[in-house]
Amino acid sequence: MVSIGAVRGLFTFIIITFTIMVTYYTVRRDAHNITGVEHAVAEGITKYTSTVEKLSSSSSAHTANTSSSVHTTNTKDDPLQHSPPEHAPPQNVQSQNDPPRRPPPATPRRQNIVLVIIDDLGIGDLKCYGSSFHETPNIDALAAEGVRFTSAYAAHPKCGPARLALFSGVYPARMGSPVSGHELEKYGMPNAFKCQKKMGDYKMRLPLERTSMGGAFKLNGYRTGYHGKWHFGDASGRGSPLDHGFEVSIGATHKGSVQSHFAPYTNPDHIKQVPPPPMSEPRPDGTYMADHLTDETIGTIKKFKNDPFLVVLAHYAVHTPIEAPEDLVDPYEKKRNLLDETDQFTHDHNAVYRTSQDHATYGGMMTAVDNSLGRVMQALKDMGLDKNTTVVFTSDNGGLASSIKEKNMPDIPTTNHPYRHGKTWLYEGGVRVPLIVHAPDRKPVEGGESAFLTTGTDMYPTLLDLAGLPLQPNDHVDGISFAEAVTTKRDGSVRKKPLFWHFGIGPNEKEGRGAVPCSALLDGRWKLLDFIDEGNRELYDIQKDPYEKNDVSNKFPEIRKNLFIKLKQWRKHWADDDFYKKELEKGEDGICVAPEGMRI
């Protein structure tokens, strides 16, 4: 017959053994190193240990009542009668006599991401980037609490291609974007050209088979929502946000602008009527688009708040038409009246370029998008999401600052001065953009400012990195993560390859918009611009001359020659023509087909 002492000793051994195992797994879980299998094992051990403890306590009580003459319980020496020490792992089963115990440590919540894109926002449009005319307190506060990047570039000087780069991580030229006749064929990639044409490249710049930003986050269990301007795919099934990993798409079309920023977002006086962007529900006439999109974005965040999420707010502002509510414009009218000089322009490269920042209505639009950011940040705080949501704020390309026709001077809304030119140009004013990262889970780099050289193709891998998700190097082939630069001093030397740009479409003579067709390369301190149709190449030392005042191509002819060789090589390898050849040979089984129902 087994003695009671032996039974109690066995129970004691079991409890101690399981306590050690639970403590081990709990420590690992608290260190965020636990796997899903280990977590399940630890929970099972916790429950089993608690059950054994209850059974042991019950057995001890029964033994004390029936065999007190044999054994007297000493609570000081009996581990079964002790309250668990403060550091002991919590139990899921608890008797009424036990003291309160800590709940199990929560699984750490993954970082949410909110990406805010302002359309045509210039490098000098924000007070935190040097504006003395625009008031942007909410954006400035984001920069003060986060990191402001001073060497951030758009991957293209125009909206649609620049956005393709942001979400795909590839240079838009690889996708034949923007389409300019037969450029892929012109530069030695006939199979790529044929494939793009079969896919419907005139509407869908990014193949549906490619995993882009939204798809990558969705594959990692994130909720995904897109709100506002899209502009590089057709909303009817040829590359809308819904086709690229976003489960919610509001206000997105392939159009680059709205006909009016006021509901119903149409203009009856416009020659060609365009349907308004699809919103979740109509708003009263006169509702301002920036406010409407902000409402929709906050609504999606509320819907997603219990799960990790990627939410994009892509404003149609501050793109034309230049419109804003009167109460936002009035303060700028008063500021403008106090200026000694207004409406200052200069001529540059056969175009007229604004050098003064004093457009009151544009200022009202700036206040509208600043208010929008303030509302989003407050909503995150109200929902308790501000500590685990990274907010990234940027523009798609440089501000609209020039025109090839002087009659358009009154319609030019901003300046990128002292940077040269603006939207559609490959001078610095057309491709330098504001970029602010507010990551509450990371200590900002000293001084809150980074000179890390980054471009639009980096956005996709960086957001994955900021969220702690694996990168997709086979997809974002032209992008690298700049997440490390949020916390650590880094410069352009981290990037092993030059930055490239290409815009082969000439100016729109009718509208007076656009620039001379150009390719450009930035390699370290040197920037080369190749004005294709003119046969003219300019070279600038961007470190010494960021405003591109002094062309030094004659002073450094070898540097100009070597950079031009690199640029020509890049143009020859925009796309892997052999890959597209194989895909064409596959016929309907390859990627060179339009989506079902849209075959051409």
Image: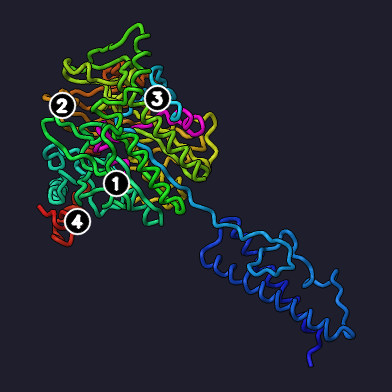
Q: What residue span does the magenta drawing correspond to?
A: 140-168
The Cα atoms of the two marked residues, 2 and 1, are separated by: 36 Å
Label 3 element class: loop
Q: Residue at x 33, y 38 (%)?
A: 292
Label 3 neighbour load within 10 Å: few <14, some 14-19, many 20+: many
Residue underneath mark 3:
126
For residue 57, side relative to residue 44 (left or right): right
- Residue 408 lies in the magenta stretch: no
Residue 429 horizontal side relative to residue 101, left or right: left
Give residue 500's mark: none
Q: Is residue 464 above or below residue 373?
A: below
Seen from the viewer's position, the closer of residues 287 and 408 is 287
State which quadrant residue 393 falls in.
Answer: top left
Indicate whether 68 appears above or below 153.
below
Q: Earlier in the sequence, mark 1 or mark 3?
A: 3
Dots 2 and 3: beta carbons under 8 Å?
Answer: no
C-alpha separation, residue under disc 2 versus residue under disc 4 = 33 Å
Give the residue pinned by disc 2: 507
Residue type highlighted by circle 1: Ser
Q: Residue at x 50, y 41 (%)?
A: 381
Task: Give me the residue at 36% from left, 44% from top.
Answer: 460
**Alpha-carbon span between mark 4 and mark 3:** 43 Å
Please give the label number shown on residue 591. Answer: 4
**Rendering coords of residue 375 (x, y %):** 43, 36
Name the residue tied to disc 1: 280
> Where does residue 87 sit, x and y in percent of width and height?
71, 59
